[in-house]
Image: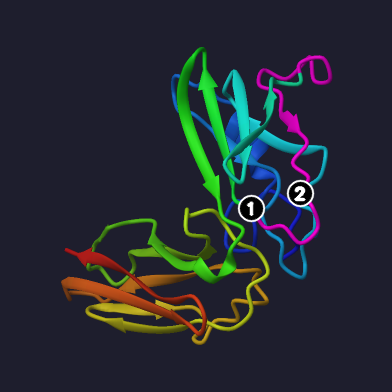
Amino acid sequence: MKYPGVVDFFRIPKLGAAFYQSQVDSSARVVLQPAFYWDFGPGSPATGPGHSATVWSNCDRLEFHIGGRRVATALPQRDRFPHLARPPFVADLSVRHGQHPDLRIDGFVGDRLAVRRSFSADPTLDQLSCVADDRTLTADGQDATRVVLRAVDRYGAARPYVAGALDFAITGPGVLVGDNPFDFEAAGGAGAVWIRTIKGLTGQVILSATHPTLGSAETAIQVV
């Protein structure tokens, strides 16, 4: 359950996964993954990720905007990582103590804007994300899918250090496999449960998750 690493107990990618995700040609998919959380809560640095904030990407150039103002332009660190096909980017993303601006990163491939990601500093706008790995299951009593729950900001970026528990409700021909309630705080604001089919029963399964501050979210799975 530690924050460093590649994946967690539920096989959800953590910050360390960004290195591997970025080592692909941008013609296949464009990747822009910070190796930090844009968070100013009690467990995070009060002045942001600092002067050596690292971002893993397969872009050619990154531009950083804090509070709507461009603060840095970065190129891949090829001199420091000559044997990496796609080295990381490093920028100074320090902010003044007490300031909580939003962050935007623009990724360029050549001169083309290929990806744009935004990160909110305001936790009051955070939401609950509930996404199933599969949209369709077979009614054989064995087929199952993972449902990933995450605390995310208003742009969909992950938020760490979330208190409270998740409560689940399920309707339709499926069985919930996992803790209910689920200790979201102990899992670091990211966790998963599974939905398993019931032999011979078809229809739509709806899993609803509720959190005391993040609200509710649901996912629907068709059993055929």
Judging depth in this view, the residue of 145 and 19 nearest the camera is 19
State the residue at coordinates (49%, 75%).
Answer: 214
Q: Earlier in the sequence, mark 2 or mark 1?
A: 2
Q: Is residue 79 rendered magenta in the image?
A: yes
Q: Are marks 2 and 1 in contact (CB under 8 Å)?
A: yes
Instruction: Identify the mark at residue 95; answer none if there is no mark.
Output: 2
Mark 2 lies on a secondary structure that is loop
Rendered image quadrant of residue 2: bottom right
Q: Position of residue 18 (x, y in %)?
A: 64, 40
Judging depth in this view, the residue of 170 and 208 nearest the camera is 208
Read off the magenta span.
Answer: 78-101
- Answer few, some or many: residues within 10 Å of disc 1's Cα (few below 14, many 20 plus, some between 14 and 19): some
- Which amino acid, by three-letter code, is at mark 2? Val
Query: Which quadrant holds the C terminus?
Result: bottom left
- Answer few, some or many: residues within 10 Å of disc 2's Cα (few below 14, many 20 plus, some between 14 and 19): some
Q: Position of residue 119 (x, y in %)?
A: 56, 50
